[in-house]
Amino acid sequence: MPGSGPLRRSSLRQQIAEALREEVLTGRLGAGRHFTVKEIADLYGVSATPVREALVDLAAQGLLDVEHHRGFQVRRFTHDDYRDLVRARTLVTDGLLRTMAEDPDSWCRRAEALESVRRRAQAAAGAARAGTLDVLVGCDLRFWRELGMLAGNVHVSEFLDRLRGQSWVFAVPYLRGVPDLAGVCWTGHEELADAVRDGDHGAARRIMAAYNEHSLTVVDGLVERSGPGPAAQRRDA
């Protein structure tokens, strides 16, 4: 369970949602884990209302399932779900890259945003090369969230973030079974950020195609070796 202790930020709903989201994405709250509003409220020392609102928010992101009269459960994703998620996020990023190709000048005008994306890319690639999974998950999500925002459409960024979060929920338990992750996870964030900055749509699409192939190959191999439900996904974390 997440670390206990009172929360004192202005938006309890947001803080609780962020704390629990991190626990789910990093696998510390494993797939199938059941909990109630009261359990989380008691853990954080807050009232039930912001907890219920936070859990509903996470359910809306597709990370939790609502169990009638029982509370909430961390959503279980299948291998087929993961493959579909990769296809879905490919469609979203293809649309993002088409926007870049159709109006390259608008991307060039976003110099400050592009520089921030480049910093996010460095952090994510560094975590991937080091094999620090928890750091990688957070850095990777921030990179793609900011990259999605370059389209100037918050709904694109939010949907891509949803797809990527769900992908991590499935993949993380398998990745935790790898003794040394250095060299396993994708490290092309900087290359992609540079292609976007330069307005090179063709290069960006090739990088994305190679990335998606890499993701599927790695996860397919891990699933084949571990079976459809690794121990980290079956147990109640």
Image (spheres, rainbow, N blue to C red):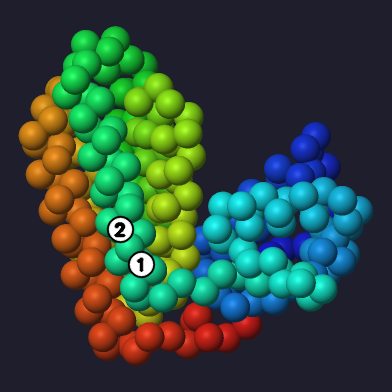
Do the residues under discs 1 and 2 have CB atoms within 8 angstroms?
Answer: yes
Q: Residue at x 47, y 34 (%)?
A: 155
- Dot 2 amino acid type: Val
Measured from the top left, where is residue 153 in percent x and y?
43, 26
Looking at the rendering, which quadrant does residue 137 occupy?
A: bottom left
Measured from the top left, where is residue 58 in percent x and y?
63, 54
Query: Quick check: 231 above or below 44?
Result: below
Residue situated in front as seen by the camera: 67 or 217: 67
Q: Is residue 28 left or right of residue 13?
A: left
Q: Residue at x 43, y 85 (%)?
A: 230
Residue situated in front as seen by the camera: 68 or 104: 68
Query: Quick check: 183 above or below 52?
Result: below
State the separation of the CA atoms marked 1 and 2. 6 Å
Q: Which mark is residue 86?
A: 2
Q: Secondary structure at mark 2?
A: helix
Looking at the rendering, which quadrant does residue 5 occupy?
A: bottom right
Query: Quick check: 161 above or below 232?
Result: above
- Dot 1 amino acid type: Tyr
Q: Residue at x 14, y 45 (%)?
A: 207
Outermost residue, front side: 68
Q: Is residue 52 left or right of residue 164?
A: right
Q: Which mark is residue 122?
A: none
Measured from the top left, where is residue 132 in percent x and y?
38, 61
Mark 2 crowdedness (10 Å alpha carbons): few <14, some 14-19, many ≥20 = some
Q: Secondary structure at mark 1?
A: helix
Q: Which mark is residue 82?
A: 1
Measured from the top left, where is residue 237 in percent x and y?
62, 78
- The quarter in which the N terminus is drawn is bottom right
